[in-house]
């Protein structure tokens, strides 16, 4: 499983960007500051500048912030440190349940043309039906279910995909990655025809109840 602990150098960067050490951040403070940093350093803000060096430097800074945010979220705001309220939202599945599924349908509703960038990187801003993406740190994969050419502003888009994972994959890893990349950008998520809030624990619970011991 991928490691998410922060090195001393990364903690120094967290202090620089977020204004506090990661262990001192509340979830609300983290979410608010992360939104501000995404707005400030988003690569599209610098497309108007005819300077490739500026674009490259801001792109690298944006990538660094996103990687740090993912580690902060996973290490301090998910898994063992989940709140009691979030824990009660988890379905009762018995001891040591296993999860697996082939082609679980997920739709992400967004008004932002750049959500595809957050999920799959710049080369995936245009998606083709059948494109396959392997989630980093796992063997789980996503297959795109439609062609996407969104380039306008203020449109509604439903990014349709199928998620496949086995019992050796960590659902916590998969949905930490998904939540990290859609939080603040998606308006809702549809999992197997059920509308779910853009919330790590709610998405995880919705998937667990559908995929426990189900090998399709």
Image (cartoon, rainbow, N blue to C red):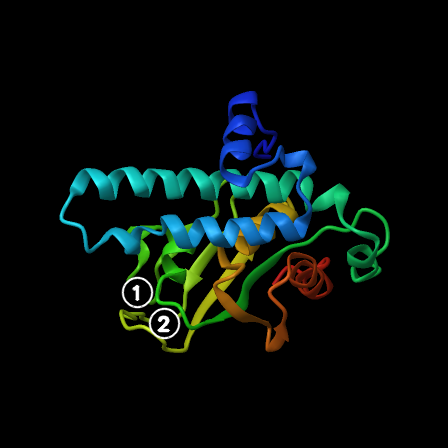
Residue at the spot x=62%, y=42% of the render?
A: 74
User: For the residues marked 1 and 2, what is the alpha-carbon distance in whole angstroms?
Assistant: 6 Å
Residue 54 location in percent, x, y? 23, 41
For label 1, the SS is loop
Q: Residues within 10 Å of mark 2 (few under 14, many from 20)?
A: some
When asked about the image quadrant of residue 110, the answer is bottom left
Q: Are marks 1 and 2 in contact (CB under 8 Å)?
A: no
Which of the two residues, 212 or 135, is positioned nearer the viewer here? 135
Is 209 situated left or right of 149 in this image? right
When asked about the image quadrant of residue 200, the answer is bottom right
Q: Quadrant of the C terminus?
A: bottom right
Q: Earlier in the sequence, mark 1 or mark 2?
A: 1
The numbered dot on residue 150 is none
Q: Name the outermost residue toward the left.
A: 50
Which of the two residues, 49 or 117, is positioned nearer the viewer here? 49
Q: Residues within 10 Å of mark 1 (few under 14, many from 20)?
A: some
Residue 75 location in percent, x, y? 65, 38
- Is there any visible trace of residue 150 in the rendered image? yes
Which of the two residues, 47 or 179, is positioned nearer the viewer here? 47
Is 139 situated left or right of 157 in this image? right
Q: Which residue is mark 1?
A: 128
- Is there any visible trace of residue 169 in the rendered image? no
Residue at the spot x=60%, y=47% of the render?
A: 30
For label 2, the SS is loop
Residue 146 location in percent, x, y? 36, 72
Q: Which residue is mark 2?
A: 146
């Amino acid at each position: 499983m991928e490691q998410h602990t922060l090195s001393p150098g990364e903690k120094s960067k967290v202090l620089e960007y977020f204004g506090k050490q990661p262990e001192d951040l509340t979830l609300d403070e983290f979410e608010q500051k992360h939104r501000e940093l995404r707005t400030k350093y988003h690569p599209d803000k610098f497309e108007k500048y005819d300077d490739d060096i500026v674009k490259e430097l801001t792109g690298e800074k944006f990538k660094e912030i996103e990687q740090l945010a993912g580690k902060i979220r996973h290490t301090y705001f998910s898994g063992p440190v989940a709140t009691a309220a979030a824990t009660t939202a988890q379905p009762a599945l018995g001891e040591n349940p296993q999860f697996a599924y082939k082609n679980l349908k997920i739709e992400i509703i967004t008004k932002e043309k750049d959500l595809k960038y957050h999920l799959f990187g710049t080369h995936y801003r245009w998606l083709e039906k059948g494109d396959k993406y392997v989630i980093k740190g796992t063997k789980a994969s996503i297959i795109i279910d439609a062609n996407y050419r969104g380039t306008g502003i203020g449109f509604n888009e439903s990014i349709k995909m199928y998620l496949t994972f086995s019992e050796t994959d960590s659902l916590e890893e998969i949905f930490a990655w998904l939540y990290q990349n859609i939080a603040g950008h998606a308006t809702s998520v549809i999992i197997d025809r059920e509308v779910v809030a853009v919330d790590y624990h709610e998405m995880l619970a919705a998937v667990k109840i559908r995929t426990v011991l189900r090998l399709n």
